[in-house]
Image: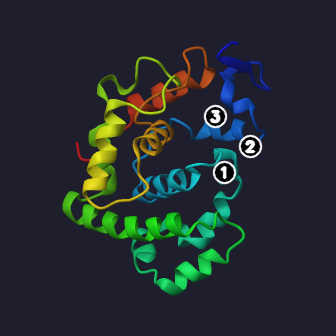
Amino acid sequence: MTETIAGPDGRPRCRWCGAAPEFLGYHDTEWGFPVADDRRLFEKLCLESFQSGLSWRTILAKRENFRAAFHGFDVDRVARFTADDVARLLRDEGIVRHRGKIEAVINNARRAQELIAREGSLAAFIWRYEPDGGQLAAPQSASTSTVSKALSKELKKQGWTFVGPTTVYAFMQAMGLINDHVEACAIRAEVEQARRSFRRPGR
């Protein structure tokens, strides 16, 4: 089986983006492009946590519902959520109604506030974990890495939950800390160009 499929324009893409119609746009415009915005980074960590045990297609299809439910993943607003908000979210059929994951988002917002107070931004902290060279040796062949394990361990040490090394690795792939588009993928070069021109936070 080849690592790529032909996109609608005839150019090769990573094979995974052919698994669902909504994946192509996500693959071509989001996945792997570097992100420095704290809100987007926090959102992605939360959504990857919700994905645990589920498919990304499920989460992507509900992404706008999640954004509405969690006020756009505004860290300060989510950090103020109460037990009433948990009850509200458990009734929300538009999201994944998992108490542990919902409570993790609220907890992690509070931990994010603490981290931002110390580091200046979530982005400045996260981008310290960009691997040397910006990519791993074997794109898409693994679900964790040495660096994702290290970031996961540090987040857990700071009190974050539902941030295991597999969740963190998927987050790093999506947010551009590594370029895991396969070598033959037409979007890989676009991501690499974006990474070259990207100003790393805190540097």
- The residue pinned by badge 3 equals 28
Q: Tell me, yes or no, whether the two marked residues, 1 and 2, touch with CB atoms within 8 Å.
A: yes
Tell whether 116 sits left or right of 74: left
- Crowd around label 1: few <14 · some 14–19 · many ≥20 (10 Å): some
- In front of the other: label 3 or label 1? 1
- The residue pinned by badge 2 equals 22
Q: Residue at x 54, y 15 (%)?
A: 183
Distance between the alpha carbons at the discs numbered 3 and 2: 11 Å
- Crowd around label 2: few <14 · some 14–19 · many ≥20 (10 Å): few
Q: Which residue occupies the foreground of this view, 49 or 25?
A: 49
- Crowd around label 3: few <14 · some 14–19 · many ≥20 (10 Å): some
From what the image shows, is residue 3 above or below residue 178?
above
For mark 2, give the secondary structure.
loop
Q: Percent x, y for residue 160? A: 34, 59
Q: Percent x, y for residue 76? A: 39, 74
Which amino acid, mark 2? Glu
